[in-house]
Amino acid sequence: MTLAAMHMPAPFAVSAGSVLGGLPTLAFSTRADGDAAVHHTPVLVAETVEWLSVSPGKVYLDGTVGEGGHAEALLDASGPNGVVLGIDRDPRSVDAARRRLTGYGDRARIVHGNYADMGDLARQSGIEHVDGVLLDLGFSSRQVDAEGYGFSFQRDEPLDMRYDPVGSTAADLLNHTDERDLADVIYRYGEERRSRAVARAIVEARPITTTGLLASVVSRALGGRRGGRHPATRTFQALRIAVNQELMHLEVGLDAVPGLLKPGGRLVVISYHSLEDRLVKGWMDREAARCICPPELPVCACEHEASVRFVRRRVVRPSAAETDDNSRSRSARLRAVERI
Ligand SMILES: C[S@@+](CC[C@H](N)C(=O)[O-])C[C@H]1O[C@@H](n2cnc3c(N)ncnc32)[C@H](O)[C@@H]1O
């Protein structure tokens, strides 16, 4: 059984136990391939190549290959014979990356899967160790804008939100979770301070099966738009994270990295919100530390060994030119460590 599958039974657990285990799945996912016109602009590409220290003939794993923008840069910088194994949970992203990278032949190996299973996926592709791992987290602009994902309140469509169209949808979660657990999900994964009011309004308006209805229910509960952000932004983020178990997969994926990287190999992670970035920073701090004992212990008792070192302590942020060109890059933060 894959690591990602082993972690499936507690999909939306925010306290003890599962709040959604065994729910019926609403079957309204019709993901027509209407993606052709929608593209994702990759973020911090030159910086990724630099901090991964990409060089010819090396082997890289891109755990979130998306449309293959970063993978293409890695293939170019590792030519003529470097290899990139690209993984994505979304079958439509896998198709898009394969189309884009077809000219690289066997140097680009694109597989459908979860980066939480990166060790197994690498071995199945004939790769034991790699010189670099990239995780460019979250969703792509194509997934936000294309039809059928239900990630955004910009278009009214079924409330799906799954990268991989199997298992429970956001509508399942909203319509079958009790009010308290729902409030916890929205508070924890959306950092929505008024999560209880939002959860109450959702429960009163159930069933909610479309993005448009959810956006208007949340907006009403929060008293309409104040400032630039849509009031439902945090709730949508929370549901996406919960439906896809994003933070749990990130933890499992990060833990797999030291076993996969060659000594001197690097990990680069690009995150887009504070929950992800805090988790990544905490993992890197812990893995780079010689001792992880509580500070009140007078002598070390943990026998922890550092597996990585920082190649740069501070985050890398996009330039003003990049944020002007691509507003999605504004929230991006890149962190990098090196295997000892
Ligand atoms: C920001 S996009 C990556 C864009 C990509 N770097 C590019 O240049 O096109 C993030 C991608 O990660 C995928 N994803 C999210 N969680 C994943 C997971 N646990 N395992 C594998 N892929 C995942 C999404 O489907 C999405 O395609």
Image: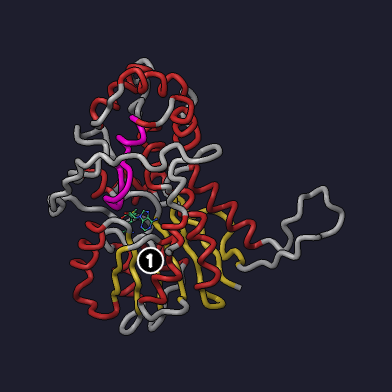
Residue segment shown in magenta: 161-175
Query: Which quadrant of the figure has residue 208?
Result: top left
| Residue 13, x across and y down, in percent | 49, 40
| Residue 98, x across and y down, in percent | 22, 68
Q: Residues within 10 Å of mark 1 (few under 14, many from 20)?
A: many
Mark 1 secondary-structure assignment? strand
Q: Which residue is mark 1?
A: 62
Q: Is residue 335 above or below residue 324?
A: below
Taking the spot 32% from the left edge, 80% from the top edge, the residue there is 79
Specify the amino acid type for callout 1.
Asp
**Which residue is nearer to you in this view: 261 or 225?**
261
Q: Quadrant of the N terminus?
A: bottom left
Q: Is residue 173 magenta?
A: yes
Query: Which quadrant of the figure has residue 172?
Result: top left
Coloration mode: secondary structure
Taking the spot 81% from the left edge, 60% from the top edge, the residue there is 300
Q: Is residue 241 above or below residue 210?
A: below
Dominant SS in magenta: loop
Q: Quadrant of the C terminus?
A: bottom right
Q: Is residue 59 above or below residue 43?
A: below
Q: Is residue 49 magenta?
A: no
Taking the spot 34% from the left edge, 65% from the top edge, the residue there is 87
Residue pushed farthest right? 298
Q: Quadrant of ligand 1?
A: bottom left
Taking the spot 30% from the left edge, 74% from the top edge, the residue there is 109
Answer with left or right where residue 261 lies relative to residue 136.
right
| Residue 279, x across and y down, in percent | 54, 49
The reply to whether residue 9 is in sight is: yes
The answer to whether mark 1 is within 8 Å of ligand 1 is: yes
| Residue 126, x across and y down, in percent | 38, 81
**Which residue is nearer to you in this view: 225 or 17?**
17
Answer with left or right where residue 1 lies relative to residue 298.
left
